[in-house]
Image (cartoon, grey):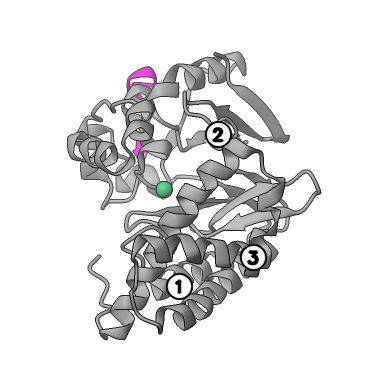
Amino acid sequence: MAATVHHVSPDLYLIVLAPPISGFQNFIGAWLMVGPDAVFLVDVGPAATADQLVEAIAALGVDCLDYICLTHIHIDHAGAVGHMARQFPGTPVVCHPKGAPHIIDPERLWQGTVKTLGETGRAYGPMLPVDPSRIASEEQLASAPFQLLDTPGHSPHHYAIAAGDYLFAGEAGGVCLPLPSGDRYLRPATPPRFFLETSLSSIDRIMATRPKALCYGHFGLQPDGMNMLARHREQLLFWKNTLAVEAAGGGLAADDNINRWVDLLLKADPQLHGFSQLSPEVQVRERGFLSNSVKGFAGYLARLERNDNQTDE
Ligand SMILES: [Zn+2]
Protein backbone atom coordinates (compact mmCIF):
# COMPACT_ATOMS: atom_id res chain seq x y z
CA MET A 1 0.00 0.00 0.00
CA ALA A 2 1.38 3.42 -0.96
CA ALA A 3 1.47 6.25 1.58
CA THR A 4 -0.51 9.43 0.91
CA VAL A 5 1.77 12.46 0.83
CA HIS A 6 0.52 15.98 1.63
CA HIS A 7 2.70 18.83 0.42
CA VAL A 8 1.65 21.09 3.28
CA SER A 9 3.98 23.99 2.49
CA PRO A 10 6.86 24.60 0.05
CA ASP A 11 9.47 22.88 2.23
CA LEU A 12 7.34 20.47 4.24
CA TYR A 13 5.64 17.17 3.51
CA LEU A 14 3.39 15.04 5.68
CA ILE A 15 3.71 11.38 4.77
CA VAL A 16 0.59 9.60 6.00
CA LEU A 17 1.32 6.04 7.13
CA ALA A 18 -1.45 3.48 7.27
CA PRO A 19 -0.85 0.55 9.65
CA PRO A 20 -3.24 -2.40 9.39
CA ILE A 21 -5.47 -1.22 12.25
CA SER A 22 -9.10 -0.14 11.91
CA GLY A 23 -9.57 3.62 12.44
CA PHE A 24 -5.83 4.38 12.20
CA GLN A 25 -5.71 5.38 8.53
CA ASN A 26 -5.31 9.13 9.03
CA PHE A 27 -3.60 9.25 12.37
CA ILE A 28 0.07 8.33 12.05
CA GLY A 29 2.63 10.06 9.89
CA ALA A 30 6.16 11.27 9.34
CA TRP A 31 7.11 14.88 8.64
CA LEU A 32 9.72 15.39 5.92
CA MET A 33 11.34 18.82 5.96
CA VAL A 34 13.23 19.70 2.79
CA GLY A 35 14.80 22.93 3.96
CA PRO A 36 17.57 25.06 2.48
CA ASP A 37 20.03 23.90 5.16
CA ALA A 38 19.01 20.32 5.70
CA VAL A 39 16.63 17.53 4.82
CA PHE A 40 15.28 15.72 7.83
CA LEU A 41 12.51 13.48 9.09
CA VAL A 42 10.51 14.04 12.24
CA ASP A 43 9.13 10.70 13.46
CA VAL A 44 9.08 7.58 11.36
CA GLY A 45 5.89 5.73 12.30
CA PRO A 46 5.70 2.06 13.26
CA ALA A 47 7.82 -0.75 11.83
CA ALA A 48 4.80 -2.13 9.95
CA THR A 49 4.77 0.92 7.64
CA ALA A 50 8.55 1.32 7.18
CA ASP A 51 8.24 0.30 3.49
CA GLN A 52 5.52 2.90 2.89
CA LEU A 53 7.81 5.57 4.32
CA VAL A 54 10.87 4.49 2.33
CA GLU A 55 8.85 4.44 -0.91
CA ALA A 56 7.27 7.84 -0.28
CA ILE A 57 10.66 9.46 0.41
CA ALA A 58 12.11 7.92 -2.78
CA ALA A 59 9.08 9.06 -4.80
CA LEU A 60 9.78 12.64 -3.67
CA GLY A 61 13.28 12.34 -5.14
CA VAL A 62 14.97 12.52 -1.75
CA ASP A 63 17.89 10.07 -1.52
CA CYS A 64 19.78 11.48 1.43
CA LEU A 65 18.65 12.56 4.89
CA ASP A 66 20.69 14.79 7.20
CA TYR A 67 18.84 13.75 10.36
CA ILE A 68 16.22 11.26 11.49
CA CYS A 69 14.51 12.93 14.46
CA LEU A 70 12.15 11.34 16.97
CA THR A 71 9.81 13.38 19.17
CA HIS A 72 9.52 10.40 21.54
CA ILE A 73 10.06 6.67 21.47
CA HIS A 74 6.48 5.40 21.54
CA ILE A 75 6.22 2.73 18.90
CA ASP A 76 3.73 4.60 16.67
CA HIS A 77 6.33 7.39 16.30
CA ALA A 78 9.65 5.56 16.52
CA GLY A 79 8.90 1.92 15.61
CA ALA A 80 10.55 2.11 12.18
CA VAL A 81 13.71 3.88 13.38
CA GLY A 82 15.89 0.75 13.06
CA HIS A 83 14.57 0.18 9.52
CA MET A 84 15.24 3.81 8.56
CA ALA A 85 18.72 3.76 10.12
CA ARG A 86 19.53 0.78 7.85
CA GLN A 87 18.00 2.49 4.82
CA PHE A 88 20.03 5.69 5.42
CA PRO A 89 23.32 4.35 6.83
CA GLY A 90 25.08 7.72 7.21
CA THR A 91 22.24 9.59 8.89
CA PRO A 92 22.40 10.40 12.61
CA VAL A 93 19.37 9.59 14.74
CA VAL A 94 18.16 12.35 17.06
CA CYS A 95 16.26 11.27 20.13
CA HIS A 96 15.93 12.20 23.78
CA PRO A 97 18.83 10.80 25.88
CA LYS A 98 16.28 9.00 28.08
CA GLY A 99 14.81 7.37 24.97
CA ALA A 100 18.09 6.32 23.31
CA PRO A 101 18.60 3.09 25.33
CA HIS A 102 15.14 1.92 24.17
CA ILE A 103 15.93 2.24 20.47
CA ILE A 104 19.39 0.69 20.90
CA ASP A 105 17.80 -2.31 22.62
CA PRO A 106 14.09 -2.18 21.74
CA GLU A 107 13.08 -5.53 23.26
CA ARG A 108 11.63 -4.08 26.47
CA LEU A 109 9.82 -1.32 24.60
CA TRP A 110 8.33 -3.90 22.24
CA GLN A 111 7.25 -6.26 25.06
CA GLY A 112 5.76 -3.32 26.97
CA THR A 113 3.86 -2.18 23.88
CA VAL A 114 2.38 -5.63 23.27
CA LYS A 115 1.44 -5.87 26.94
CA THR A 116 -0.35 -2.49 27.04
CA LEU A 117 -1.79 -2.36 23.52
CA GLY A 118 -2.33 -6.06 22.72
CA GLU A 119 -3.42 -6.59 19.10
CA THR A 120 -2.86 -2.92 18.19
CA GLY A 121 0.70 -3.15 19.54
CA ARG A 122 1.38 -6.33 17.57
CA ALA A 123 0.01 -4.70 14.39
CA TYR A 124 2.62 -1.93 14.73
CA GLY A 125 5.29 -4.61 14.22
CA PRO A 126 8.53 -5.34 16.11
CA MET A 127 11.38 -2.83 16.01
CA LEU A 128 14.94 -3.34 14.77
CA PRO A 129 17.75 -2.12 17.04
CA VAL A 130 19.74 1.03 16.26
CA ASP A 131 23.52 0.84 16.66
CA PRO A 132 24.68 3.18 19.47
CA SER A 133 27.13 4.85 17.06
CA ARG A 134 24.11 6.17 15.13
CA ILE A 135 22.78 8.37 17.93
CA ALA A 136 23.52 12.01 16.99
CA SER A 137 26.60 13.43 18.71
CA GLU A 138 26.81 16.83 20.40
CA GLU A 139 28.70 18.18 17.37
CA GLN A 140 26.10 16.88 14.94
CA LEU A 141 23.38 18.50 17.01
CA ALA A 142 25.27 21.77 17.38
CA SER A 143 25.10 22.36 13.61
CA ALA A 144 21.48 21.19 13.25
CA PRO A 145 18.95 23.65 11.77
CA PHE A 146 16.47 22.90 14.55
CA GLN A 147 16.18 23.38 18.28
CA LEU A 148 15.27 20.53 20.62
CA LEU A 149 12.88 21.47 23.44
CA ASP A 150 12.78 19.13 26.40
CA THR A 151 9.03 18.66 26.82
CA PRO A 152 8.18 15.79 29.19
CA GLY A 153 4.55 15.05 30.02
CA HIS A 154 3.06 12.74 27.42
CA SER A 155 6.21 10.70 27.99
CA PRO A 156 9.34 11.41 30.06
CA HIS A 157 11.50 11.19 26.92
CA HIS A 158 9.85 13.80 24.76
CA TYR A 159 11.21 16.52 22.49
CA ALA A 160 9.32 19.21 20.66
CA ILE A 161 11.39 20.35 17.69
CA ALA A 162 11.47 23.97 16.52
CA ALA A 163 12.60 24.59 12.94
CA GLY A 164 11.99 27.99 11.34
CA ASP A 165 8.28 28.72 11.36
CA TYR A 166 7.42 25.14 12.31
CA LEU A 167 7.10 23.52 15.66
CA PHE A 168 6.94 19.73 15.58
CA ALA A 169 4.99 19.11 18.75
CA GLY A 170 4.91 15.32 18.98
CA GLU A 171 2.17 14.90 21.57
CA ALA A 172 3.19 17.79 23.85
CA GLY A 173 0.26 19.87 22.53
CA GLY A 174 -2.22 17.00 22.64
CA VAL A 175 -3.85 15.40 19.62
CA CYS A 176 -5.62 17.61 17.08
CA LEU A 177 -7.91 16.35 14.35
CA PRO A 178 -9.27 18.65 11.64
CA LEU A 179 -13.05 18.36 11.28
CA PRO A 180 -15.32 18.55 8.23
CA SER A 181 -16.85 21.70 9.77
CA GLY A 182 -13.44 23.42 9.62
CA ASP A 183 -13.06 23.39 13.41
CA ARG A 184 -10.64 21.16 15.30
CA TYR A 185 -11.12 18.32 17.76
CA LEU A 186 -8.45 18.64 20.46
CA ARG A 187 -7.74 15.87 22.96
CA PRO A 188 -5.21 15.48 25.80
CA ALA A 189 -2.65 12.69 25.37
CA THR A 190 -2.07 12.09 29.08
CA PRO A 191 -1.66 8.36 29.75
CA PRO A 192 -0.52 7.17 33.20
CA ARG A 193 1.81 8.14 34.87
CA PHE A 194 0.72 11.68 34.24
CA PHE A 195 1.97 14.84 35.97
CA LEU A 196 -0.09 17.92 35.16
CA GLU A 197 2.51 20.49 36.20
CA THR A 198 5.16 18.80 34.04
CA SER A 199 2.88 18.96 30.99
CA LEU A 200 1.94 22.59 31.62
CA SER A 201 5.62 23.62 31.91
CA SER A 202 6.33 21.84 28.65
CA ILE A 203 3.53 23.74 26.90
CA ASP A 204 4.92 26.98 28.36
CA ARG A 205 8.41 26.07 27.10
CA ILE A 206 7.00 25.61 23.59
CA MET A 207 4.93 28.82 23.75
CA ALA A 208 8.04 30.78 24.80
CA THR A 209 9.43 30.09 21.29
CA ARG A 210 6.26 31.71 19.83
CA PRO A 211 5.75 29.07 17.15
CA LYS A 212 3.74 29.84 14.06
CA ALA A 213 2.65 26.54 12.51
CA LEU A 214 2.12 23.63 14.88
CA CYS A 215 2.86 20.23 13.31
CA TYR A 216 1.09 17.60 15.37
CA GLY A 217 2.27 14.03 15.87
CA HIS A 218 -1.43 13.22 15.47
CA PHE A 219 -2.39 14.88 13.09
CA GLY A 220 -1.47 17.49 10.53
CA LEU A 221 -0.47 21.16 10.55
CA GLN A 222 -2.39 23.99 12.18
CA PRO A 223 -1.28 27.53 11.24
CA ASP A 224 -2.39 29.15 14.53
CA GLY A 225 0.11 27.37 16.78
CA MET A 226 -0.01 29.77 19.73
CA ASN A 227 -3.81 29.70 19.79
CA MET A 228 -3.89 25.90 19.67
CA LEU A 229 -1.35 25.62 22.50
CA ALA A 230 -3.34 28.09 24.61
CA ARG A 231 -6.50 26.08 23.92
CA HIS A 232 -4.77 22.89 24.98
CA ARG A 233 -3.37 24.43 28.17
CA GLU A 234 -6.86 25.59 29.11
CA GLN A 235 -8.21 22.13 28.31
CA LEU A 236 -5.79 20.38 30.69
CA LEU A 237 -6.86 22.74 33.50
CA PHE A 238 -10.53 22.19 32.59
CA TRP A 239 -10.06 18.41 32.85
CA LYS A 240 -8.32 18.80 36.20
CA ASN A 241 -11.07 20.99 37.65
CA THR A 242 -13.92 18.92 36.22
CA LEU A 243 -12.47 15.57 37.31
CA ALA A 244 -11.36 16.86 40.73
CA VAL A 245 -15.01 17.56 41.60
CA GLU A 246 -15.97 14.05 40.45
CA ALA A 247 -13.02 12.41 42.18
CA ALA A 248 -13.94 14.06 45.48
CA GLY A 249 -16.74 11.46 45.63
CA GLY A 250 -14.10 8.71 46.01
CA GLY A 251 -13.64 5.48 44.06
CA LEU A 252 -10.90 6.92 41.86
CA ALA A 253 -9.93 5.14 38.68
CA ALA A 254 -12.45 2.29 38.86
CA ASP A 255 -13.23 1.33 35.27
CA ASP A 256 -16.90 2.34 35.43
CA ASN A 257 -15.81 5.75 36.70
CA ILE A 258 -13.40 6.14 33.79
CA ASN A 259 -16.19 5.46 31.28
CA ARG A 260 -18.50 7.85 33.08
CA TRP A 261 -15.82 10.54 33.10
CA VAL A 262 -15.13 10.11 29.39
CA ASP A 263 -18.86 10.64 28.74
CA LEU A 264 -18.90 13.63 31.05
CA LEU A 265 -15.93 15.27 29.31
CA LEU A 266 -17.36 14.55 25.86
CA LYS A 267 -20.39 16.62 26.92
CA ALA A 268 -18.64 19.32 28.93
CA ASP A 269 -15.30 19.98 27.17
CA PRO A 270 -15.85 22.33 24.20
CA GLN A 271 -12.56 21.16 22.62
CA LEU A 272 -14.02 17.65 22.27
CA HIS A 273 -17.28 18.76 20.67
CA GLY A 274 -16.20 17.60 17.23
CA PHE A 275 -16.26 13.98 18.42
CA SER A 276 -19.69 13.42 16.82
CA GLN A 277 -18.25 14.45 13.43
CA LEU A 278 -15.64 11.66 13.53
CA SER A 279 -16.31 8.40 11.69
CA PRO A 280 -17.50 5.41 13.78
CA GLU A 281 -14.07 3.64 13.58
CA VAL A 282 -12.27 6.82 14.59
CA GLN A 283 -14.71 7.31 17.49
CA VAL A 284 -13.80 3.81 18.74
CA ARG A 285 -10.10 4.65 18.50
CA GLU A 286 -10.57 8.02 20.20
CA ARG A 287 -12.68 6.53 23.02
CA GLY A 288 -9.77 4.18 23.77
CA PHE A 289 -7.29 7.07 23.91
CA LEU A 290 -9.73 9.26 25.89
CA SER A 291 -10.04 6.49 28.52
CA ASN A 292 -6.28 6.25 28.78
CA SER A 293 -5.91 10.02 29.12
CA VAL A 294 -8.64 10.12 31.79
CA LYS A 295 -6.82 7.30 33.63
CA GLY A 296 -3.72 9.48 33.62
CA PHE A 297 -5.69 12.31 35.23
CA ALA A 298 -7.33 9.92 37.72
CA GLY A 299 -3.91 8.73 38.88
CA TYR A 300 -2.65 12.29 39.10
CA LEU A 301 -5.65 13.38 41.21
CA ALA A 302 -5.36 10.33 43.48
CA ARG A 303 -1.70 11.16 44.14
CA LEU A 304 -2.63 14.80 44.70
CA GLU A 305 -5.07 13.71 47.40
CA ARG A 306 -2.31 11.66 49.06
CA ASN A 307 0.12 14.53 48.66
CA ASP A 308 2.36 12.25 46.64
CA ASN A 309 2.91 13.95 43.30
CA GLN A 310 6.67 13.77 43.05
CA THR A 311 7.77 13.17 39.51
CA ASP A 312 9.78 9.99 39.23
CA GLU A 313 11.32 10.96 35.93
ZN1 LIG B 1 3.14 8.93 22.20
Which quadrant, please, contains the C terminus? bottom left
For label 1, the residue is 201
Q: Residue furthest right?
A: 181
Q: Residue at x 28, y 26 (%)?
A: 126
Q: Are marks 1 and 2 in contact (CB under 8 Å)?
A: no
Q: Residues within 10 Å of mark 3 (few under 14, many from 20)?
A: few
Numbered mark located on residue 23 in the image = 2
Task: Name which quarter of the figure residue 302 lies in.
Answer: bottom left
Helix, strand or loop at mark 1:
helix
Which quadrant, please, contains the N terminus? top right
Indicate the amino acid at tag 2.
Gly
Q: Residues within 10 Å of mark 2 (few under 14, many from 20)?
A: some
Q: Residue at x 36, y 56 (%)?
A: 155
The stretch in magenta equals 86-93
For label 3, the residue is 267
Query: Compared with residue 173, is residue 94 higher up or lower down, i.e. above or below?
Result: above
